[in-house]
Amino acid sequence: MNSSPESPEHAGWLAEARLLILAAQREGSRQLGASLREVGLTTAQAEVLEVLHAAGELTLAELGRRLVCEAGSPSRLVDSLVRAELVTRTPSAQDRRTVLLALAPEGAARLARLGAAGAPLTAFMAERLDPEQARTLVDLLGRLVRDTPGGLAIARRAADHTG
């Protein structure tokens, strides 16, 4: 695949696509942020709770490989969630040197409340995209982030839902 635009028109479409992606991300973040404030979570905290809900117990490294919002090791983020009693840490039964992270009951309760609070963002998208358009958007964005750290994190999370 060519790494540079094939024509000025192609370059223009790519520039517009970049701006539209940024605008969509900004609007989504604004709406999601409002919903998260209702349940007392940040975007990164909510993502950790969602990942642990889907995957069950994970090591810190495994969790880090599934996060899109947090780059590197999420140790400080996890520390804040443990202090807030939203996530638990327990030694692994197989290897006492390994610590497993899991969703605490209060974390599950917050996540359930977030589901209801996040409904307006889903409704916003559903008003603008029919199922076929949503699938096309997912396909195109998936192609755009394939083999990037964020794309790999999303693929790992998808595996948690299917495996």
Image: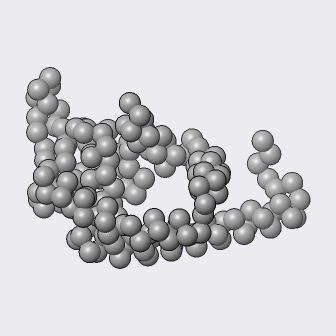
Up/down of 108 relative to 63, above or below? below
Residue beneath the point at 64% across and 57% down? 133
View extreme (right): residue: 7
The residue lying toward the viewer, choosing from 61 and 24, is 24
Q: Quadrant of residue 1?
A: top right
Q: Is residue 76 above or below residue 19?
A: above
Q: Is residue 65 visible?
A: yes
- Position in image of residue 118 (x %, y %): 36, 67
What residue lies at 22% left-to-right and 38% top-to-bottom? Answer: 57
133 or 103, nearer to the observer: 133
User: Left or right of 38: which side holds 25?
Assistant: right
Tell me: 28 left or right of 105. right
Farthest top residue in view: 94
Q: Position of residue 37 (x, y in %)?
A: 28, 74
Residue 144 in view here: no
Query: Which quadrant would residue 90 be assigned to in this image?
Result: top left
Relative image position of residue 100 (x, y in whole percent): 18, 38
User: Residue at image x 13%, y 57%?
Assistant: 106
Residue 62: % across, % down: 32, 38
Which residue is pictured at 14% across the width and 30% down the height? 92
Image color mode: one colour
- In the rendered image, the quadrant that contains the C terminus is top left
Q: Is residue 110 above or below residue 135?
A: below
Q: Is residue 8 left or right of residue 70?
A: right
How many numbered circles does the render carry? 0
Residue 11: quarter of image: bottom right
- Choose between 3 and 19: the one closer to the eye: 19
